[in-house]
Image (tube, rainbow, N blue to C red):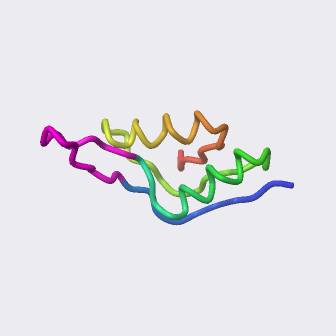
C-alpha cells in the first residue's frame, strides 16, 4: 500500500531550561507521514518543503523515517 500525504510542516521552537530555543520539526500531517512510514507503509509526502536551514531539518527528519518527499520540479 502507498499513501500520499499533504498538509503542513513546521518547526516548533522549544525553550530549554538554559533559555536556548531548540528547533523540532513537526506538524500534524508530517507526524502522520512519519508514523505511517515507521509502520512500513510506503509514504509520499506532497507538501512543499523550503530549502533554507529549517526546511533542511524537516527534510532530514522525513528522510530518517524513509518518507518519500515529492517536490515540484
Q: Position of residue 19 (x, y in %)?
A: 12, 42
Q: Nearer the viewer, residue 36 or 15?
A: 15
Q: Is residue 20 above or below residue 44?
A: above
Q: Position of residue 20 (x, y in %)?
A: 16, 39
Rendered-image quadrant of the N terminus: bottom right
Is 54 placed left or right of 64 in the picture? Answer: left
Is 3 placed left or right of 25 in the picture? Answer: right
Magenta-drawn stretch, dominant element (helix, strand or loop): strand
Q: Residue at x 63, y 39 (%)?
A: 65
Q: Is residue 15 above or below residue 56?
A: below
Q: Which residues are magenta?
A: 11-24
Is 33 placed left or right of 14 in the picture? Answer: right
Q: Nearer the viewer, residue 66 or 12?
A: 12
Is 2 placed left or right of 30 in the picture? Answer: right
Q: Residue at x 55, y 56 (%)?
A: 31
Q: Nearer the viewer, residue 72 or 32?
A: 32
Q: Position of residue 68 (x, y in %)?
A: 65, 43
Looking at this view, name the residue that lies furthest to the left: 19
Whether residue 12 appears in magenta in the rendering, the answer is yes
Q: Nearer the viewer, residue 16 or 60?
A: 16
Amino acid at each position: 500500500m502507498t499513501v500520499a500525504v499533504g498538509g503542513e510542516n513546521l518547526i516548533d521552537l522549544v525553550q530549554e531550561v538554559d533559555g536556548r530555543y531548540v528547533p523540532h520539526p513537526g506538524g500534524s500531517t508530517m507526524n502522520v507521514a512519519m508514523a505511517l512510514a515507521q509502520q512500513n507503509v510506503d509514504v509520499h509526502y506532497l507538501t512543499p518543503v523550503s530549502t533554507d536551514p529549517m526546511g533542511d531539518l524537516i527534510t532530514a527528519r522525513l528522510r530518517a523515517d524513509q518518507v518519500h518527499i515529492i517536490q515540484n520540479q
